[in-house]
Image (cartoon, rainbow, N blue to C red):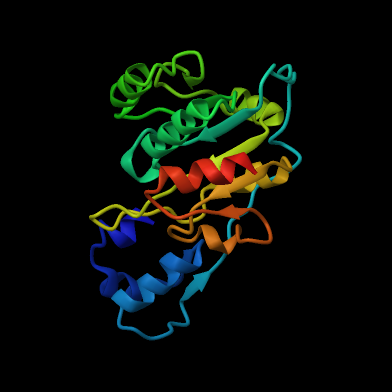
Amino acid sequence: AKDVFVDAELIVQKADSAKFITICNENTYKKFLELSGGKNRENVHLVFHGIDAGKIFQGSKQEKLDKPLIYSIARLVEKKGLNYLIDASKILINENIDHYLYIAGPGPLYSTLMNQISENNLQDTVKILGDGNGLSNLDAMNMMQVADIFVMYSLQTQDGDVDGVPTVVIEASLAKKVVVATNAGSIADLIDEQTGVIVPQRDARSLAEALKM
């Protein structure tokens, strides 16, 4: 979605000259049409992306942990809202709700998030797996299997950057996990109040309340 919402270049020219363009989520599709003249175009198609469900959960399973596991797979960048997720974990600990929060993903905010974990004395509760380098898909999916709740706390940033439908939300749904998410970007293409739990953006307290349910 970033190449439409933030780094859009030559949209009209691309729409006029391309034989076909496919866009995988409704929010970006609508924005592209708006930027390309505000009308439907026969060569621009909304094609939802999917994954091969038979290939994502392979290999040995992790053992179930001794406390409920809240899990997020996300790049360590602003639009993934991980600082709010860590704040929500602190709220739960303050209310004597014992749990683990594991985050898997690479990104430039690794040091910032590790400092936040340390400053809140959450080292025994919150872990960023892979030391900021992320995990292999196999390892990330193995951990998904033992998670109790999956969180995708996406934000729309000030410069307009926002998710489409993160593939990992599809994977979490296929794994039959409770999904807690915001309505940022096009997540509502997949997750709504019938298929998951929707919480407001930039509100750690509301996120913590949702995680208690």
Q: Position of residue 98 (x, y in %)?
A: 59, 23
Residue drawn where x is 35% and y is 16% of the image? 118
Quadrant into which the C terminus falls = top right
Residue 125 relative to residue 78: left or right:
right
Q: Quadrant of residue 54?
A: top right
- Between 137 and 27, which is closer to the camera in this rendering? 27
Q: Position of residue 26 (x, y in %)?
A: 49, 68
Residue drawn where x is 44% and y is 18% of the image? 122
- Between 99 and 111, which is closer to the camera in this rendering? 99
Residue 188 relative to residue 154: left or right:
right
Q: Is residue 152 visible?
A: no
- Between 16 and 8, which is closer to the camera in this rendering? 8
Residue 209 relative to residue 56: left or right:
left
- In the rendered view, would you say 150 is above or below 6? above
Residue drawn where x is 58% and y is 56% of the image? 49
Quadrant into which the N terminus falls = bottom left
Q: Position of residue 152 (x, y in %)?
A: 51, 44
Residue drawn where x is 30% and y is 29% of the image? 109
